[in-house]
Structures are given as C-alpha cells and as structure tokens.
Image: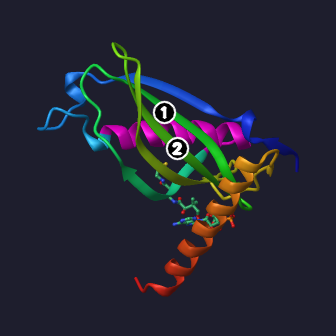
Amino acid sequence: MKTKKVSDSKIEMREMVMPHHTNPQNTIFGGTVMSWIDIAAAMCAAKHCNKPVVTVHVDELHFISPIKVGEHVLIKASVNFVGNSSIVVGVKVQSENPYFNEIKTTTRAFLTFVALDSNGKPTQVPRLEIINDEEQRRWDNAKIRVEAARKLRSQLSN
Ligand SMILES: CC(C)(COP(=O)(O)OP(=O)(O)OC[C@H]1O[C@@H](n2cnc3c(N)ncnc32)[C@H](O)[C@@H]1OP(=O)(O)O)[C@@H](O)C(=O)NCCC(=O)NCCS
C-alpha cells in the first residue's frame, strides 16, 4: 500500500457569513460551522485515500470565539493520523475581518472517517509519511485520542 504525505490532502475552504447562517445572537449558528467542518474534513480524508469516506466520530469540537455576519471563514483540514481503514482529520476554523485584517481561531475539531470499498465495507488506507515535528506532534496527540475513545467505547454499555 502506497504512502501519502500530509501535504497531499490538505484542504482550505472559505465561506462568508450571511444573515441566514446566524443564530438569535446574530453570530454564526454552530450547526453551520459543524457542517463546513465535516465537509472540509471529508474532502481531506477522501483525498488521502482516493476512496469514498464516511464520518464515524467527532472529537473535541470546541467553539472558542463567535463569528459575525460579513466575516470571512477559513476552514483548514489536514490528516493527523491513520489506522487500517480509518483517517483522523484535524480541523481549524478561523474568522477573518476583511476590513481590519483581524484573524481569530474560532473552532477546532478532530473527525474520524472510514474509507469504504465498492461493497460499502471498511478498506485499507495509505500510510501517512510524517516529515516534520509538527506532524509528529499531531500524530502522537491523535493516537492518544483514538486509543482513549476506543477504551471508552469498550467500557460503556449500550
Ligand atoms: C463506517 C462503518 C461501515 C464501519 O463499520 P464497523 O463495523 O464499525 O467497522 P469496523 O469495526 O471494522 O471499524 C472500522 C474502523 O472504523 C473505526 N471505528 C468504527 N467506529 C468508530 C467510532 N465510533 N469512532 C472511531 N472510530 C471508529 C474502527 O476503529 C476501525 O478503524 P481501523 O480500521 O483504522 O482500525 C459503519 O460504522 C457505518 O456505516 N457507520 C455510519 C457512517 C455514516 O453514516 N456516517 C454519517 C454520514 S457520512
């Protein structure tokens, strides 16, 4: 199975906050941000494995600061970790005020996808070639989260 680099599948997606994206506080509705995160992360995972992917888990979704109408939203997604058929994608969302060039990190999340074969069954994904300390740090952190989530799933009864 071939190896891929993080840079082979990085995604950057941009949106602008329109009035129909907002909540009663006139800032962006969290569900809209979650949808953009899922789309960017899914594109990233599919680019890594060149196969259809489905979301199986969302981890540590943190809303750090609100985003206002008219602000630009930058959604950055990159592969952090891979298992046999699973791909963990880290997503960072930033708001950009186009009038003051002010950039803020507003949301972070980690999503797990599973690659599917033509029968809809989990299938192997390419290994990830780590080339720098930052990618290694993200890999190590993702591994801790994956193992903790697996342990939790096995401990909790349905
Ligand atoms: C994806 C799916 C086919 C996997 O089936 P499954 O029977 O759980 O498959 P497996 O037990 O063989 O697990 C496959 C991989 O997914 C991982 N996985 C499964 N459930 C998981 C979960 N809740 N969280 C994190 N990882 C999970 C497993 O650890 C395994 O990873 P690995 O191959 O890298 O070791 C099935 O869970 C599914 O169809 N889920 C619904 C997906 C969906 O509809 N998403 C929303 C729309 S995109």
Q: How is the image coloured?
A: rainbow
Q: How far is the residue under mark 2 from the one under mark 1?
A: 7 Å
Q: Position of residue 43 (x, y in %)?
A: 58, 36
Left or right: 130, with 35 as reference point: right
Q: Residue tagged by mark 2?
A: 91
Q: Position of residue 99 (x, y in %)?
A: 33, 13
Whether residue 20 is visible here, answered yes or no, is yes
Q: Position of residue 139 (x, y in %)?
A: 69, 57
Q: Is residue 147 above or below residue 57?
A: below
Mark 1: which secondary structure?
strand
Callouts 2 and 1 close, C-beta under 8 Å: yes
Residue closer to the observer: 95 or 150: 95
Residue closer to the observer: 151 or 97: 97
* Magenta stretch secondary structure, dominant: helix
Q: Residue tagged by mark 1?
A: 75
Mark 2: which secondary structure?
strand
Kind of residue sitting beneath label 1 = Ile
Q: Please give the range of residues in magenta.
A: 32-52
Whether residue 50 is visible here, answered yes or no, is no
* Quadrant containing the C terminus in the rendered view: bottom left
Q: Residue at x 48, y 37 (%)?
A: 39
Ligand 1 quadrant? bottom right
Q: Residue at x 76, y 56 (%)?
A: 124
Residue 153 located within the stretch drawn in magenta: no
Other residues around mark 1 within 10 Å, as few (<14) / some (14–19) / many (≥20): many
Q: Is residue 57 above or below residue 148?
A: above
